[in-house]
Each structure stands twice: as C-alpha cells, then as structure tokens.
Image (cartoon, rainbow, N blue to C red):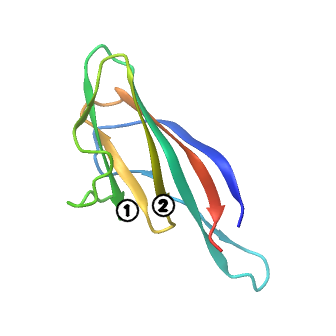
Amino acid sequence: MSRKIVRFGPIALTTNLTTNILNPPTVTGGVNAGSSPCYIELRKVTIVNKTSSDATFSLWIGATGANAAGTEFLGTARSVRANSAFSEPVMTRLDSTDFLVGGAGTGTALTIMLEGYMGVAG
C-alpha cells in the first residue's frame, strides 16, 4: 500500500448545503486488473473567511448530495470569525463510497482546503 500527500482545494463554499466537496476516485484499467478503490485520509481541514462579517459552514460525510442527520462532520452552522480561519486537525478516512458534502451560510464567503493522503486500498 502506498500513499501520496495531497491537497484538495481551495474550494469556495456556496449556500447549497448538499454540494459534493470531495469524493475519492476509483482506479480502473489495464488487462484483467479489475478496479481498486482509492481512499483519502483527511488530516487537516482549513476554512478561511475572506469577508468582514462572521460566516458559518456545515459539513457531512455520507451519500452523494446528502446531509442526513447523524452524518455531521465538524459541526453544522459552525461560525468562522470575520477575516480569519478555522483550522482543525482530523484523522478521517473517506472511501470511494463516501462523500464530503456541505456549504456555507453566505455565498462564497468561505473557502475550504483539505490536506491529507490518497492511496489505493489493498
């Protein structure tokens, strides 16, 4: 099993709280090789507020385009102070069937950047 350090984003968060932000790819191809799903190990989430007013974000891990109760990730309607950043170390694995979904309370006030590792499941 090998992993590569990766960065996802920066991505502007919109007011659509069911936006797919991140989902690991699958690897296919070759001859008689089948397919191997990739995974992502998130290690850090940073959300920057570029405006002069506080703004909120909400994140979920689950199905595509869904924000079902019980799948919240780092909170809902969590506030980021004006002209500052929220940064949180995490240890969260996303498999090819997992989607990081979410958005902001104010259109394009917040930008998300994710750091971690990507690998192929063995």
Q: Position of residue 95 (x, y in %)?
A: 50, 66
Residue found 32% across the figure and 51% down from its top: 73
Percent coordinates x, y for residue 45 in the rendering: 45, 40
Residue 94: give its label: 2
Quadrant of residue 66 in the image? bottom left
Mark 2 vs mark 1: which is more N-terminal?
1
Question: For the point 36% across and 52% down, which residue is it?
Answer: 101
| Position above or below: 46 against 68 | above
Circle 2 packing at 10 Å, graded few (<14), some (14-19), many (20+), is some
In this view, the residue in front, 67 or 88, is: 88
Task: Give the number of callouts.
Answer: 2
Residue 109 is tagged as: none
- The amino acid type found where label 1 is placed reads Thr
Q: Nearer the viewer, residue 101 or 29?
A: 101
- The Cα–Cα distance between marks 2 and 1, rounded to whole angstroms, is 13 Å
Element type at mark 2: strand
Q: Nearer the viewer, mark 2 or mark 1?
A: 2
Element type at marker 1? loop
Residue identifier under label 1: 64
Q: Residues within 10 Å of mark 1 (few under 14, many from 20)?
A: some
Is 56 placed above or below 66 here? above
Q: Amino acid at mark 2?
A: Leu
Residue drawn where x is 22% and y is 39% of the image: 77
